[in-house]
Image (cartoon, rainbow, N blue to C red):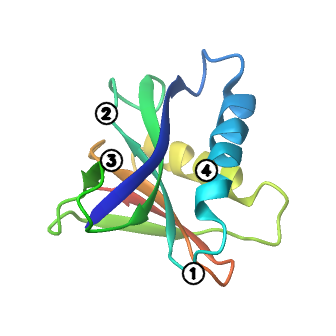
Amino acid sequence: MKLKVINSIRTNNFTDERLIERITELWQRASDRLANQEAITYAVYHTYENDYKGDYSLSITVEADDGEPSLEIPDNAKYEIFSVDTTMEHGVFSTWKEIWAREDAGTLERAYSFDFEKYYPNGEIEVHIAI
């Protein structure tokens, strides 16, 4: 899958004191380019330093094959898919907490290649974790 990068940041879930603010700004900057699009939007987590406690890059992307700067996610990658409860105020964050808890418990073995949140035009959200 080829994805066109709208914008990116490098951050850390535990040491970046401005994490929420920076992710909010990332989405706000992307919103102008995403307006009026019916395409699926992806928040791609990549270039991991090590595990979920280390630094990583987060890129807001859309599917594209037009020669723009892109991330390419291998077609043969395997994922465990988590559905986000979009009725919860912090449904995406709650889903990530579940993913981290499963990893800590040894019931989810992550590949740390490309993970992504998939935002459908109908409001549905899935988190795809590389395994």
Classify the position of the C terminus by image quarter.
bottom left
Real-space CA distance between mark 1 and mark 3, rounded to the nearest whole angstrom: 31 Å
User: Where on the picture, by quarter, is residue 67?
Assistant: bottom left
Residue 127 place in picture, x, y as percent: 51, 62
**Residue 27 appears left or right of 49:** right
Which of disc 3 and disc 4 is earlier in sequence? 4
Q: Amino acid type of disc 3?
A: Arg
Q: Residue lying at the far bottom in this picture: please name it.
A: 122
Q: Earlier in the sequence, mark 2 or mark 1?
A: 1
Q: Which comes before the other along the chain, label 4 or label 1?
A: 4
The residue singled out by tag 1 in the image is 38
Amino acid carrying mark 1 in the image:
Glu
Amino acid, disc 2: Thr
Residue underneath mark 3: 110
Cα distance in 3D space between marks 4 and 1: 15 Å
SS label for mark 3 = loop
Give the percent coordinates (x, y) of residue 101.
56, 44
- Give the CA separation, mark 2 to mark 1: 28 Å
Q: Residues within 10 Å of mark 3 (few under 14, many from 20)?
A: some
* Pointer 2 local density, CA inside 10 Å: few below 14, some 14–19, many at least 20: some
Q: Residue at x 66, y 47 (%)?
A: 27
Between 86 and 60, the one lying in front of the other is 60
Q: Residues within 10 Å of mark 4 (few under 14, many from 20)?
A: some
Please name which of the two marks, 2 or 3, marks the residue nearer to the observer. 2
Residue labelled with disc 2: 47
Residue 70 against residue 20 in the figure, above or below: below
- Distance from disc 4 to disc 2, alpha carbons, whole Å, reads 20 Å
What residue is shown with label 4? Answer: 30
Mark 2, mark 1: which one is toward the viewer?
1
